Image (cartoon, rainbow, N blue to C red):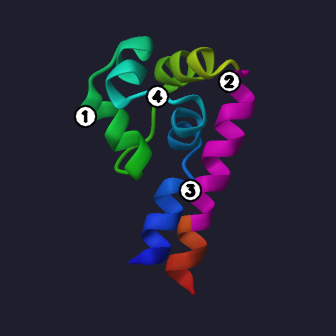
């Protein structure tokens, strides 16, 4: 359970929100989506699509390809933990 919580907390969007003290509601508003959507992204329930990736990267102040790279690394960590 702790590994799953640590993995969830390592989500790039969640880490950005914590570092910048951005609430779930604020993030959702910045990205033009619902709080449920942001929560789903942060929990790994689903991945943001291309348009959403642009919105997230824009809000976070980074390039899309950098965000996609961080996101894929984050997802790979879960797969590695599940395989172990």
Residue 1 image position (x, y, % from top left)? 38, 78
Give the numbered dot on residue 75: 3
Element class at badge 2: helix
Q: What span is in magenta?
A: 62-77
The tag on residue 64 is: 2
70 relative position to 81: left or right: right
Instruction: Say if 79 sits above or below 45 in the image.
Output: below
Magenta segment includes 69: yes
Q: Earlier in the sequence, mark 4 or mark 3?
A: 4
> Mark 1 sits on what residue?
36
Secondary structure of residue under mark 4? loop
Q: Can you tell which mark lies on residue 49? A: 4
Crowding at label 2, few (<14), some or many (≥20) Cα neighbours within 10 Å?
some
Residue pushed farthest front? 21
In this view, the mark in front (4 or 1): 1
Q: Label 1, secondary structure: give it.
A: helix
Q: Is residue 51 above or below residue 8?
A: above
Q: CA distance from mark 4 to mark 1?
A: 15 Å
Q: Earlier in the sequence, mark 2 or mark 3?
A: 2
Percent position of residue 80, x then y: 60, 74
For the residues labelled 2 and 1, say whether their Cβ atoms are less than 8 Å apart.
no
Label 1 neighbour load within 10 Å: few <14, some 14-19, many 20+? few
Q: Left or right? Give the position of 20 relative to 35.
A: right
- In this rendering, which labeled residue sits more in front, label 2 or label 1? 1
Gap in angstroms between the C-alphas marked 4 and 3: 15 Å
User: Residue 76 at what x, y percent from top left?
Assistant: 61, 61
Which of the two discs, 4 and 2, labels the residue nearer the N terminus?
4
Identify the residue at horizontal 54%, vertical 69% (top origin): 79
The Cα–Cα distance between marks 2 and 1, rounded to whole angstroms, is 22 Å
Numbered disc in front, either 4 or 2? 2
């Amino acid at each position: 359970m702790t590994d799953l919580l640590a993995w969830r907390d390592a989500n790039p969007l969640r880490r950005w929100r914590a570092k910048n003290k951005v609430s779930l509601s604020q993030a959702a508003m910045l990205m033009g989506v619902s709080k449920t959507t942001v929560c789903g992204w942060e929990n790994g329930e689903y991945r943001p699509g291309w348009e959403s990736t642009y919105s997230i990267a824009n809000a976070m102040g980074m390039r899309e390809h950098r965000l996609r790279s961080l996101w894929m690394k984050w997802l790979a960590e879960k797969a590695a933990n599940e395989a172990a």
